[in-house]
Protein backbone atom coordinates (compact mmCIF):
# COMPACT_ATOMS: atom_id res chain seq x y z
CA UNK A 1 0.00 0.00 0.00
CA UNK A 2 2.76 2.42 0.98
CA UNK A 3 4.65 1.60 -2.21
CA UNK A 4 1.67 2.49 -4.44
CA UNK A 5 1.19 5.79 -2.56
CA UNK A 6 4.85 6.69 -3.15
CA UNK A 7 4.54 5.77 -6.82
CA UNK A 8 1.40 7.88 -7.14
CA UNK A 9 3.04 10.88 -5.46
CA UNK A 10 6.12 10.53 -7.66
CA UNK A 11 3.98 10.42 -10.77
CA UNK A 12 2.00 13.48 -9.58
CA UNK A 13 5.26 15.42 -9.08
CA UNK A 14 6.50 14.55 -12.54
CA UNK A 15 3.19 15.61 -14.09
CA UNK A 16 3.27 18.91 -12.16
CA UNK A 17 6.79 19.67 -13.41
CA UNK A 18 5.83 18.85 -16.98
CA UNK A 19 2.73 21.04 -16.76
CA UNK A 20 4.81 23.92 -15.41
CA UNK A 21 7.20 23.64 -18.36
CA UNK A 22 4.51 23.69 -21.03
CA UNK A 23 3.79 26.86 -22.93
CA UNK A 24 0.35 28.45 -22.85
CA UNK A 25 1.08 30.85 -25.71
CA UNK A 26 -1.79 30.64 -28.19
CA UNK A 27 -0.33 33.17 -30.61
CA UNK A 28 -0.38 31.55 -34.06
CA UNK A 29 2.18 34.02 -35.47
CA UNK A 30 4.94 32.44 -33.35
CA UNK A 31 4.02 29.02 -34.68
CA UNK A 32 4.03 30.32 -38.27
CA UNK A 33 7.49 31.83 -37.80
CA UNK A 34 8.78 28.51 -36.51
CA UNK A 35 7.47 26.63 -39.55
CA UNK A 36 8.96 29.19 -41.94
CA UNK A 37 12.42 28.81 -40.39
CA UNK A 38 12.39 25.03 -40.66
CA UNK A 39 13.59 23.51 -43.90
CA UNK A 40 10.99 21.76 -46.00
CA UNK A 41 10.73 18.03 -45.61
CA UNK A 42 10.90 16.23 -48.92
CA UNK A 43 9.03 12.97 -48.94
CA UNK A 44 11.37 10.57 -50.72
CA UNK A 45 11.68 6.84 -50.39
CA UNK A 46 14.25 5.85 -47.83
CA UNK A 47 17.57 4.96 -49.39
CA UNK A 48 18.69 1.45 -48.74
CA UNK A 49 21.79 1.28 -46.67
CA UNK A 50 23.93 -1.48 -48.03
CA UNK A 51 25.06 -3.90 -45.39
CA UNK A 52 28.65 -4.86 -46.10
CA UNK A 53 28.99 -8.39 -47.34
CA UNK A 54 31.86 -10.69 -46.62
CA UNK A 55 34.10 -10.55 -49.68
CA UNK A 56 35.97 -13.82 -49.11
CA UNK A 57 34.82 -17.25 -50.25
CA UNK A 58 36.64 -20.21 -48.69
CA UNK A 59 37.31 -23.63 -50.20
CA UNK A 60 38.21 -27.06 -48.91
CA UNK A 61 41.67 -28.58 -49.43
CA UNK A 62 42.48 -29.15 -53.11
CA UNK A 63 38.91 -28.20 -54.13
CA UNK A 64 37.33 -25.62 -56.38
CA UNK A 65 33.73 -26.61 -55.65
CA UNK A 66 31.59 -24.02 -53.90
CA UNK A 67 30.37 -24.92 -50.44
CA UNK A 68 26.59 -24.77 -49.89
CA UNK A 69 26.90 -21.97 -47.29
CA UNK A 70 28.96 -19.95 -49.79
CA UNK A 71 26.22 -19.96 -52.39
CA UNK A 72 23.93 -17.71 -50.32
CA UNK A 73 26.71 -15.15 -49.95
CA UNK A 74 27.36 -15.23 -53.69
CA UNK A 75 23.66 -14.77 -54.44
CA UNK A 76 23.73 -11.61 -52.32
CA UNK A 77 26.81 -10.40 -54.19
CA UNK A 78 25.11 -11.15 -57.52
CA UNK A 79 22.07 -9.12 -56.47
CA UNK A 80 24.32 -6.11 -55.92
CA UNK A 81 26.41 -6.66 -59.05
CA UNK A 82 23.55 -7.02 -61.54
CA UNK A 83 23.31 -3.88 -63.62
CA UNK A 84 26.49 -2.47 -62.11
CA UNK A 85 28.86 -1.09 -64.73
CA UNK A 86 31.97 -1.46 -62.56
CA UNK A 87 34.46 -4.28 -62.92
CA UNK A 88 34.79 -6.79 -60.11
CA UNK A 89 38.05 -8.71 -59.67
CA UNK A 90 37.92 -12.29 -58.41
CA UNK A 91 41.29 -13.19 -56.89
CA UNK A 92 41.97 -16.91 -56.53
CA UNK A 93 44.35 -18.14 -53.81
CA UNK A 94 45.73 -21.45 -52.52
CA UNK A 95 47.73 -22.66 -49.56
CA UNK A 96 51.44 -23.47 -49.84
CA UNK A 97 50.94 -27.20 -50.35
CA UNK A 98 51.67 -28.28 -53.92
CA UNK A 99 53.85 -26.76 -56.60
CA UNK A 100 53.70 -23.12 -57.57
CA UNK A 101 52.19 -24.01 -60.95
CA UNK A 102 49.58 -26.30 -59.43
CA UNK A 103 48.54 -23.63 -56.92
CA UNK A 104 48.23 -20.98 -59.63
CA UNK A 105 45.95 -23.31 -61.58
CA UNK A 106 43.94 -24.17 -58.45
CA UNK A 107 43.50 -20.48 -57.59
CA UNK A 108 42.27 -19.86 -61.13
CA UNK A 109 39.81 -22.77 -60.96
CA UNK A 110 38.45 -21.37 -57.69
CA UNK A 111 38.05 -17.87 -59.10
CA UNK A 112 36.38 -19.31 -62.22
CA UNK A 113 33.96 -21.29 -60.05
CA UNK A 114 32.90 -18.05 -58.34
CA UNK A 115 32.67 -16.26 -61.70
CA UNK A 116 30.56 -19.02 -63.24
CA UNK A 117 28.16 -19.01 -60.30
CA UNK A 118 27.77 -15.21 -60.46
CA UNK A 119 27.12 -15.37 -64.21
CA UNK A 120 24.43 -18.01 -63.63
CA UNK A 121 22.85 -15.52 -61.20
CA UNK A 122 22.61 -12.89 -63.95
CA UNK A 123 25.85 -10.94 -63.50
CA UNK A 124 27.37 -9.74 -66.79
CA UNK A 125 30.50 -11.84 -67.42
CA UNK A 126 32.27 -8.86 -68.99
CA UNK A 127 32.24 -7.11 -65.60
CA UNK A 128 34.11 -9.96 -63.89
CA UNK A 129 37.90 -10.25 -64.01
CA UNK A 130 39.60 -13.47 -62.87
CA UNK A 131 43.15 -13.54 -61.56
CA UNK A 132 45.07 -16.19 -59.64
CA UNK A 133 47.79 -15.52 -57.12
CA UNK A 134 48.17 -19.16 -56.12
CA UNK A 135 50.18 -19.30 -52.89
CA UNK A 136 51.94 -15.96 -53.48
CA UNK A 137 49.69 -13.74 -51.34
CA UNK A 138 48.69 -15.64 -48.21
CA UNK A 139 46.01 -14.20 -45.97
CA UNK A 140 47.79 -15.78 -43.02
CA UNK A 141 51.40 -16.90 -42.84
CA UNK A 142 52.26 -20.22 -41.29
CA UNK A 143 52.05 -23.93 -41.88
CA UNK A 144 49.23 -24.73 -39.47
CA UNK A 145 45.97 -26.11 -40.76
CA UNK A 146 44.09 -22.98 -39.65
CA UNK A 147 46.50 -20.79 -41.66
CA UNK A 148 46.09 -23.04 -44.69
CA UNK A 149 42.29 -22.86 -44.42
CA UNK A 150 42.45 -19.05 -44.47
CA UNK A 151 44.55 -19.16 -47.63
CA UNK A 152 42.19 -21.41 -49.65
CA UNK A 153 40.01 -18.59 -50.88
CA UNK A 154 38.68 -16.25 -53.53
CA UNK A 155 38.60 -12.57 -52.68
CA UNK A 156 35.89 -10.46 -54.36
CA UNK A 157 37.20 -6.94 -55.05
Image: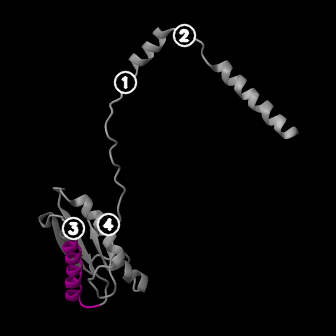
Is residue 75 found left or right of 24 in the rendered image?
left
Q: Earlier in the sequence, mark 1 or mark 3?
A: 1
Q: Position of residue 152 (x, y in %)?
A: 32, 80
Question: Considering the image in quadrants, where does the N terminus appear?
Answer: top right
Mark 4 crowd level (few <14, some 14–19, many ≥20, 10 Å Cα) = few
Which residue position holds label 4? 55
Which label sits in the foreground, 3 or 4? 3
- Cα separation, mark 2 vs mark 1, equals 23 Å
Residue 51 against residue 155 in the figure, above or below: above
Of labels 3 and 4, earlier in sequence is 4
Query: Which tag is nearer the camera, tag 4 or tag 1?
Result: 1
Q: Position of residue 146 (x, y in %)?
A: 43, 82
Residue 59 image point, x, y percent: 32, 80
Please name the predominant secondary structure of the magenta segment in the image.
helix
Quarter location, residue 113: bottom left
Along the line of sight, which residue is nearer the eye, 110 or 100? Answer: 110
- Residue 109 on the magenta segment: yes
Residue 78 in which image quadrant: bottom left
Q: Nearer the viewer, mark 4 or mark 2?
A: 2
Identify the disc placed on residue 39: 1
Does residue 147 show up magenta in the picture?
no
Q: State the residue in front, 115 or 88.
A: 115
The residue tagged 2 is 26
In the picture of the structure, the residue carrying the numbered disc 3 is 121
Which contiguous range is marked in magenta? 98-117
Helix or strand or loop: what does disc 2 sit on?
A: loop
Amino acid sequence: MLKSVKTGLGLACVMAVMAGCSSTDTDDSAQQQMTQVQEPVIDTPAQETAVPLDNVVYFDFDQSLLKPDTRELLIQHADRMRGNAGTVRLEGHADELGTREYNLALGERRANAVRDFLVLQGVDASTLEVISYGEERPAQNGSSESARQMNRRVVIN
